[in-house]
Amino acid sequence: MLGTLAPLACVVGLLAGCTPASVASPAGQASPAGHGCRPLSPTVRPTVGDPATRDRLSGVLDAFAQRAWNPTAPAVRPSQLTGGLYINYRSSFDGVSHPGSLTNVNTNGLSDADAHKDSRHDPLADLAVLRDLDAASAAGIRSSATERLRCLLQPVTAAEFANYGPVRGLVYTQLSELSELDPGGPWRDEAHRFALNLAKAFSDPTTLGATASKPAVRPDWVAESAEALVDAGSRFGTPDWTALGAQLAVQLVTKVANPVTALFPTAVEVDAAGAVKVTDPLTRVGAQAQLLDALLSVADRTGNGQVTAAVAAGLAAVGSPEIGLADTLHGGWFFGVAADGSDLRTAYKETRSAWMLPLLQHAARSGLPVATGDSGETERLVRDSMYLSSSAGYVYRLAPDWTVYRHLGGAPPVAEDWVSSEATAIAVNVLLGDLSKETA
């Protein structure tokens, strides 16, 4: 694998106790971070500009980087390298002491170790956090701890996403963004390989990627895959991929959006003739935001009015007072609702709903009407309301008033105050803003 040997040397050095050197280089210029770790030469930079947002990002990433690395995380195929991120950690964890009881905590309050279960390790979190660390470094937001974590994640993530298979279009987006933030890494080649896999998986767009043996389909993954194929067609000079992505988006909005609300369910099954059956009707706000944002990217690139109209309708539904997803008292959005507008779930909110921020920004750029709060308001919500100060980071679920959510399934109820790697990656990604090409 290209770019693996040098980062491995970095890992050895870091585990031996070295710290990254020369991190105070000019803004956006990532310097060598100790013992052979590959420096960055970004061709893009994030657009984050608000000083309060930069301060939040700096504090969150530094605290996270001091605690989130798990040197004993089990290798995930095809990688054979040990190490990665904890799923989550309690705010009392110092990054060293008693990780077994303070990390990888389940909603019942027991850690993997306390429950005597195998330690969990999510390579998708490794990928998302590495992308964020690279982007933050390109923006001049870095510390010794964040550079150390970036170096530790480089070889592990490269090994985990060598010829990645599952058809999650967001993986392509993160690989392609890494290829621009870290051109010396293996990311562009892996993005191209992944696009090849997507083109095969969705060769018949009428089935939305379903097969006889695997009829289940996630609409948000399909939308992100359509966006990936459209981008890959342009990036790699393969117009057939762009056409395939456009067809896939049309099939999705035609067959899966609820005809009354325009919301998309969580899961469907598709038979060989292309007929769709809803298997999980719940519309989760975070997934819906990612889905609509991906479809809007397809519409922007292809000029397809049908897809644009579907996004506008879906966005209006998320902000609809009748449907009730938008919380008019405390701001933000409740967890979810059935795609037909029934069964509103108001017990908690997810940090994953932070994906509404890039959707609102994108919709404004594309001239779509927005009835669910402006992007400046939403940035403040992600930066301040979703941030749990008592945990010094981002947790996965919060109470509707942005305090600690207490899961009622426990006795006593379990306070979900542990910092989540996935939630951190989402919040940091959206607060950093879009990646813009270098002009200098």
Image (cartoon, rainbow, N blue to C red):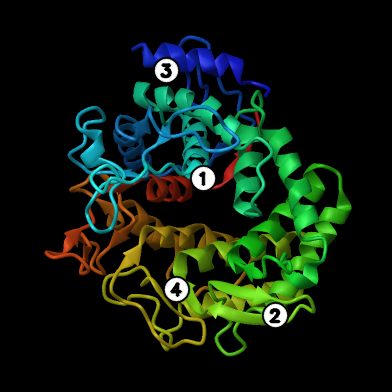
Query: Distance between the Cα atoms at labels 4 and 1?
Result: 30 Å
| Nearest to N terminus: mark 3 or mark 1 | 3
> Which residue is tagged 2?
255
Residue 124 appears in the rendering? yes
Query: Distance between the Cα atoms at labels 4 and 2?
Result: 26 Å
- Observer-side mark, 3 or 1, equals 1
Q: Is residue 33 above or below residue 231?
A: above
> Which residue is tagged 1?
124
Q: Is residue 222 above or below residue 12?
A: below
Query: Distance between the Cα atoms at labels 3 and 2?
Result: 51 Å
| Nearest to N terminus: mark 4 or mark 1 | 1
Labelled pair 2, 1 in contact (Cβ < 8 Å): no
Residue 33 appears in the rendering? no
On-image quarter of the C terminus: top right
Picture coordinates of residue 2, whole percent (x, y) = 68, 22
Labelled pair 4, 2 in contact (Cβ < 8 Å): no
Q: Could you say whether the residue bearing mark 4 is in a helix, strand or loop?
A: loop
| Image position of 64 (left or right of 435) | left
Amino acid carrying label 3: it is Val
> Which residue is tagged 3?
23
| Nearest to N terminus: mark 3 or mark 2 | 3
